[in-house]
Image: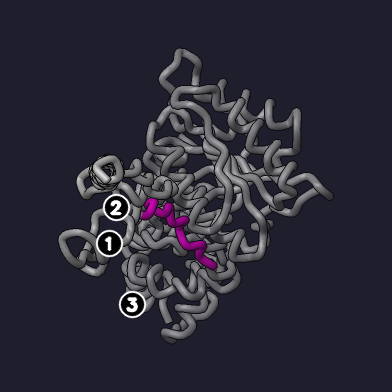
Amino acid sequence: MDGYLGVIVIVVVVALLAAGGLFLLFRPGGKSAPPVAPPETAPLPEEEKERPKTGTEEGEGGATTTLPPPVKPAEPMVVAPEVEVPPPSAGRMVRLRSRLARSQSALGRGLLDLLSRDRLDDDVWDEVEELLIKADVGVAPTQAIVEELRTKVKVLGSRTPEEVRALLREQLLIQVNPDLDRTLHVKPHGERAAVVLVVGVNGTGKTTTTGKLARVLVGDGKKVVLGAADTFRAAAADQLQTWGERVGADTVRGPEGGDPASVAFDAVAKGIEEKADVVIVDTAGRLHTKTGLMDELGKVKRVIEKKATVDEVLLVLDATTGQNGMRQAQVFGEVVNITGIALTKLDGTAKGGIVISVQRELGVPVKLVGLGEGADDLAPFDPEVFVDAIIGE
């Protein structure tokens, strides 16, 4: 009995020990399973990392708002100048007639007043002669006009104002010579552009006249290329390029102080390449080198003729310079065979008689006249409109 009791006690003790071991093994706070790593997430793009949070995103610390990425400032746009459409050359001088009449009316009124006197003695004819010479008509043309008027007046005897005006108009028109060919030779030769060479001293409005001539030709439907061969004046090429951009004409230019002949040659080459109708080359009015101006102009013309024909040589004269302008014309004429005169500032002087004297001395017609400061104030010269503007209605 005691033996059974001892065995029971041993079994109970073993059972208790086993239960205690199990308790110690699985009790709370014991060694637990290793933590499970959170699932990997894809890294955010750099833009997302740098983007500030805003109040509409849910997360720690409450709602945030997401701002859009910063907008890069727009690149500044280079706006090309608006291309203008100039008016055609036809009728330009008629439209500008009133401007011409304002400056020339003193001459016309003076002549009409003198010729309307009841008695035309030698003193009156001397006054007529003096008035014409002051208007830069020139001595020889003045003498011819006075002689013809004296003869006609004697034949008429009595004179009405209408007859006096008709006599004066007739004689002035004869001296202006409406029969001269005033056509601008700007017709291309097949696929080769016509070439216009613009010459004259600085200060006469040469570069401005070149730009205005481009407007005249573009207004007549021609494609124009400009050559800035006045490399002496720093602003000449810029000025000419501005004129060209306004009407969509390309301008060929070279470095300041560069070879004018090279620029002229390149301009003609570009005109041929682009199938332009006309190439207008602006030349220097003076040079900073030891080479004489006239020698340089001769070289420019010769170099151009290696590539094309110089169809027109326009001499730009300032109408206010009077007989000084005549001397300029004679010097240029000896070098480059002038084919026409562009007379500027005719609206600001009562000395329009230079039209008569310069044509008589050179045997070259006035083809263009500048009648104002506006872009479209260059007009083809019309002898009848000019004379009518002088003597008035």
Residue drawn at 38 percent across, 44 percent down: 37
Is residue 238 within the magenta segment?
no
CA gap, disc 1 to disc 3?
A: 94 Å
- Secondary structure mostly seen in magenta is loop
Q: Secondary structure at mark 1?
A: loop
When the figure is inspected, residue 85 is found, relative to residue 248, above or below; the finding is: below
Q: Which residues are magenta?
A: 74-85
Marks 1 and 2, the one that precedes in the sequence: 2
The residue lying toward the viewer, choosing from 3 and 303, is 3
Q: Is residue 161 left or right of residue 68?
A: right
Which mark is first along the chain, 2 or 3?
Answer: 2
Dot 2 surroundings within 10 Å: few (below 14), some, or many (20 or more)? some
Q: Circle 2 sits in a helix, a strand or a loop, which is it?
A: loop
Q: How many marks?
A: 3
Residue that mark 2 sits on: 51
Give the quarter of the figure containing the C terminus: bottom left
Where is residue 348 drawn, in percent x and y?
Answer: 33, 59
Q: Residues within 10 Å of mark 3 (few under 14, many from 20)?
A: few
* Percent of width and height locating residue 316: 49, 45
Tell us which disc is closer to us: 1 or 3: 1
Q: x and y percent of residue 376 in the render?
A: 46, 64
Residue 153 at least partly seen: no
View extreme (top): residue = 290
Q: Is residue 33 above or below residue 53?
A: above
Tell whether label 2 touches label 1 (CB within 8 Å). Answer: yes
| Marking on residue 67 | 1
Splitting the image into 4 quarters, where does residue 374 fall?
bottom left
Distance of mark 3 from mark 2, alpha carbons? 97 Å
